Image (cartoon, helix red, strand yellow):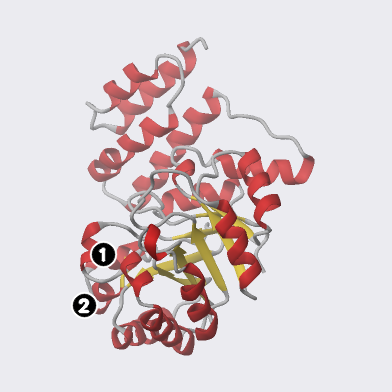
Amino acid sequence: MLNGDIFLAPLAGVSDVAFRILASEMGASLTFTEMVSIKGLYYNNDNTSIITYIDKREGPVGLQVFGSDEKIMEEVIQTKFNNRDDIYQLDLNLGCPAPKIVKNHEGSYLMKEPKKVKNIVSTMVKNSKVPVSVKIRLGFDDKNKNFLEVADAIVEAGAYMITLHARTREMFYSGNADWNDIKVLKNHVPIKVVGNGDVCSVEDYVRMKEETGVDAVAIGRHALGNPFIFKQIKDYNLSKKYSSPTLEEVIDTIKRHYKLELEFKPERIAIREMRKNILWYLKGFKGSNKVKNTINTLNDIDEIFDVLNEYKNNCVL
């Protein structure tokens, strides 16, 4: 059983093991790996295999996969997943709008093919020792909002949970997520439904729960540089109160994030990848642009920490 109803959605290039540890510590009750290619795992691609690593310090983790070949799916589940005891659930991605994924008839392209979806999910359910969930969109475009049809196929195939990102593939991440369609889905299917899209605060979380009746809420882009949102929601659920992180707390979390990344990646890669996280973490803080620009020129962790400490000690908000 999950201890809570707030999830970290899978985020390519962001929800790696270090960030998932932070999110779990802050209060996320379920996190997901970055989506991983079933074909990449089948052909033993080293970079793909790294994505599936789960650390003992994490809470429950769903391993998210994408792919459309049932035979390869069956083989990978049986040979690479079922011998592990650290995967909480398998999640099939039918939501990724990236052109290179769609071009290969994977990700959100599969929203066009409910029968194919049923076959893939059935294969996963029959072969996986852990529960199977699926992430979907409203449809491929406005003229083809077939999420209920796809959801029916997923239910018939035996999945236990559906996450709906309430946008079409055509929208990518623009416009507004249609929460009413999340409510429609929740009222339509007998399995768990997770709402996803435009939840950027405690108030949004509360409103989505009230307006849609979902079993859980998944936060994606609004967790970028903001794992604190999970603590805020956790605190609110316990006491109806929450607070914003101080600059000191943000800086300390950045440093911890760096240290965690260094456990799993070479220093040069960890430093390079953390540059985007710094932008998100310090957004809105006075004088942060200068700090971000300086850090982008540095390649030594001690020098970076010196800059962060100086900013923390001297910044007057």
Q: Nearer the viewer, residue 185 or 245?
A: 185
Secondary structure beneath dot 1 equals helix
Q: Is residue 314 above or below residue 174?
A: above
The residue identified by callout 2 is 43
Q: Which residue type does callout 1 highlight?
A: Val
Q: Which residue type does callout 2 highlight?
A: Tyr
Q: Is residue 77 above or below residue 230?
A: below
Q: Nearer the viewer, residue 220 or 139?
A: 139
Q: Residue 181: x percent and y percent? A: 55, 58
Q: Is residue 73 above or below residue 106?
A: below
Q: Residue at x 65, y 43 (%)?
A: 233
Residue 25 left/right relative to 35: right
Q: Is residue 259 visible?
A: yes
Q: Residue at x 52, y 23 (%)?
A: 247
The quarter of the displayed image where residue 294 is located: top left
Q: Is residue 126 above or below residue 236?
A: below
Residue 173 left/right relative to 272: right
The residue identified by callout 1 is 102
Secondary structure beneath dot 2 equals loop
